[in-house]
Image (tube, grey):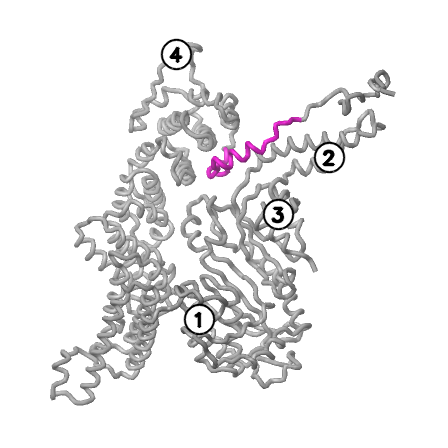
Amino acid sequence: MFKTRPLLSALINPRRTLERNGGLYNFLCTMSEGARDEQTAKPLKRSNEENEDSGERAQDAKRIRAEGEHAEDEKRYPKKKVVLLMAYSGKGYYGMQGVSAAGQVVSLKVRLIEDIVEKINGHLPPQIKVLGLKRVTQSFNSKNNCDGRTYSYMLPTVAFSPKDYDTGNIAAFRLEPETLQRVNRLLALYKGTHNFHNFTSQKAPSDPSARRYITEMSCGEPFINSNTEFAVITVRGQSFMMHQIRKMIGLVIAVIKGYVKDEVLERSWGLEKVDVPKAPGLGLVLERVHFDRYNKRFGGDGLHERLEWEREEEAIKAFKEAHIYPTIVETECQEGSMVSWMSTLPIHDFEGTANVTQDNTDQKPSEKEKGVVSAADACGKLFCTLLERKELFIGKLPEEEDAMSGEYSAEQKYHMFMRHRYNSCVEILLEHLSHELHEVKESALCCLMKFAAGEGQHPLEDLDWSEYYSFPRELIQAVVDRLLSKTTDNSLLISRFQEFLEMDDVRFYVISSIRENVGKVMDKSKGAVVPVYQSNVFTLMSNISVPSQQSELTNFMVKQEAKHKDWKAAKLNEHKRVFERMWLGFLKYKLPSNMYKKVLVILHDSILPHMSKPTLMIDFLTAAYDVGGAISLLALNGLFVLIHQHNLDYPDFYKKLYNLLDPSIFHVKYRARFFHLVNIFLSSSHLPVYLVAAFAKRLARLALTAPPTALLVVLPFIYNLIRRHPSCRVLIHKPSTEDEPLEDPYLMDEEDPAQCCALESSLWEIKTLQKHHHPDVAKAAMLINTPLPQQEDDISEVLEITTYELMERDLKQKQIKSIPLEFETATQLLKGGGDVLAQHFCLD
């Protein structure tokens, strides 16, 4: 059995591994073609090979040369933040109890040497393999940035056999289609947000971390492997607790086998303790790690790749078929872990419950909290049942006092009474959306959405539904109004509401409700900034994504019985229309300063593609530019998209970009993005020479006071501008008189690049930087003394370099250099070359 833990630990925690065994870490961080050549180089022959110390001296000389070249390798291959896509078989951890992975993602810093993935795999056993590598932002963390995981669980279908089935021959069992349908019905109940405190250990019912959101769970069609029938259960969720998936599957197996009734699932999400069995860990495989928010923010900026692995799909499939599935099948057939576990199911007391007790009284749910949550659940079940039975009054409801008059029958009075009670319940639940306890707010929200679904199927209005559409728009509007609080940050509750936004009709009417609410609130505030309210609005709006194709509109909370295709909520162009009006209605008001960045970062990827007329954003982008700083640059990015993709005529674009160049650009958070975008803006070879010269000269002037990390970006940037526009070489070859002071005609304070006289000046600033205190900067500045090669410098390698990385690289450089010597160095006081000293100064 191979030992995978040290190898995986080396990839995930390289520094700690270096202290224990530096082999793999040193390979990842320092291996290069030059170092490899040095390892295979033969030592030079020496004339004094008979000397007993010649081997040691040769090794010392080799070590000195290797250290010198190692320092060069560190310069050539600086450390970069990357993610590795890994696959491994879990059997090598703790026997069959480990979790396998087909798409694990880890983040670390490595030196991007040539063929690094192949070289890493050369140091790994076959059961562990790196399948891909991608660059990420410096602050990326594979654990913290993850917003979803997909697991699969492979099991023999005999797990779903009746409890009295003879498991002596599992190869003979075949799963019936009806049983598979029931399995999927039970697994589908897990979808949504539930309290999974019974599916892990050491979690109290009131612990918010026990609430987890499951987006998908289903069982696939059975298949035969090694004469045994297997099936694969797939589950995706935002996050999972220890043993949660195994217990979710274990409880469904217990229900299917007949040990307990279906309602145990809903009971397990309550406040009481339920005995939930835990299925074996053999078949559990991590399939995918999802980074949707990261992809949305950085995946389309042109500087970073999306963390998606379409090109690696074949390699992932091949690894599973070669190393994961055979291990699961072989171990199951030989050891029978599932059959052994099923024999323990009778000892579980599924009906037995116990109140959860905790030593920490702060974790106990309060009696008030228990009462409100229980009442909300009870009311939800009651009124949903009454809606289905049509026992609520339909039509215009008279006042409660009038309803009790003698002109109505007893049955009508009952229906009116229950309708008044229903309306009162809705009002109370809407008020509880502002409750101080999150659990109460969440229960109220879920109950209201149940009412919305019920009203959609059984309308309470007395209308001809062949002419109208039965959707509870007023109730959805009321929910949205409460979510968009002016005084309370509802981001947590809005994230819970995101589950309902996956339904196409709910999303359509929520978009309309947001637009109406924003217009009403912001007009009342007379355009003044309302930070908390606008933050809630942006949080809700940024969670809304419009489908890209009409065929994707299939998930409806309420399906219209008549003319469903004519319903606006079922048409993609109507979704885009209300989506566009929502964003335009929100962005026409003044925003808090920190919100401009949030909007502009997602603008080109999440907003503009879904708008029918993206040029309508010109007013917002112009206003954002006036804010200044990094916001102005991000606004210009949006304008650039409109210019190049939507034929927007904006003649002041480069003038505005030119005026953004000031000393602060070297210290802003978005410096890498700034220079990446400016490089794109100035990439055209058709720009006028005076404009390019103005940018080159202004950057050169700013370079005089820039930090070293910025200079390593600015200097190659200027060289690239000159390469693209050879006419700008006049800035380098400007004739001058040595030792004669001249006045620079360039006007630094001129806002118009056409009037700054850049072409009459020269790049004397780069000449000055040749005496810079940092050797890398001085070396880069010296390049202007020689003819520049035609190939442009790749500035992407230095865009995100930090001062810490620069200092770390300099501190690790070895000061000792290898010096070739013509004589043999002395190793002892009275012993030198040829033992001459020993002959004349012998102590004997």
- Determine which residue is flagged by label 1: 357
Q: Callout 1: helix, strand or loop?
A: loop
Quarter of the image with the N terminus in it: bottom right
Numbered label attached to residue 41: 2
**Number of the front mark, 3 or 4:** 3
Front in this rendered view, residue 280 or 567: 280
Q: Tell whether position 183 is magenta.
A: no
Q: Is residue 741 above or below residue 202?
A: above
Choose mark 1 or mark 2, whichever is in front.
Answer: 1
Q: Position of residue 88 (x, y in %)?
A: 61, 58
Please rate how many residues cluster around mark 4, counting C-alpha atoms within 10 Å: few if below 14, some from 14 to 19, many from 20.
Answer: few
Tell me the number on the disc at residue 315: none
Is tag 3's residue or tag 4's residue first in the polypeptide sequence? 3
Q: Is residue 803 magenta?
A: yes
- Kindly indicate whether the residue at mark 2 contacts the one at mark 3 (C-beta within 8 angstroms): no
Residue 812 x %, y %: 58, 34
**Real-space Cα separation, disc 3 to disc 1, in angstroms:** 41 Å
- Per the rendered image, the range of residues in magenta is 793-817
Q: Position of residue 535 (x, y in %)?
A: 29, 53
From what the image shows, is residue 17 above or below residue 689? Answer: below
User: Which of labels 4 and 1 is toward the front?
Assistant: 1
Residue at mark 4: 741
Q: CA distance from mark 3 to mark 2?
A: 28 Å
Disc 2 residue type (three-letter) = Ala
Residue at numbered disc 3: 17
Q: Decide: few, some or many residues near mark 3? Use Cα within 10 Å; few <14, some 14-19, many ≥20.
A: many
Q: Is residue 475 left or right of residue 57?
A: left
Distance from Cα at disc 1 to Cα at disc 2: 69 Å
Q: Earlier in the sequence, mark 3 or mark 2?
A: 3
Residue 743 shows in the view? yes
Determine whether the residue tagged by mark 2 lies in a helix, strand or loop: loop
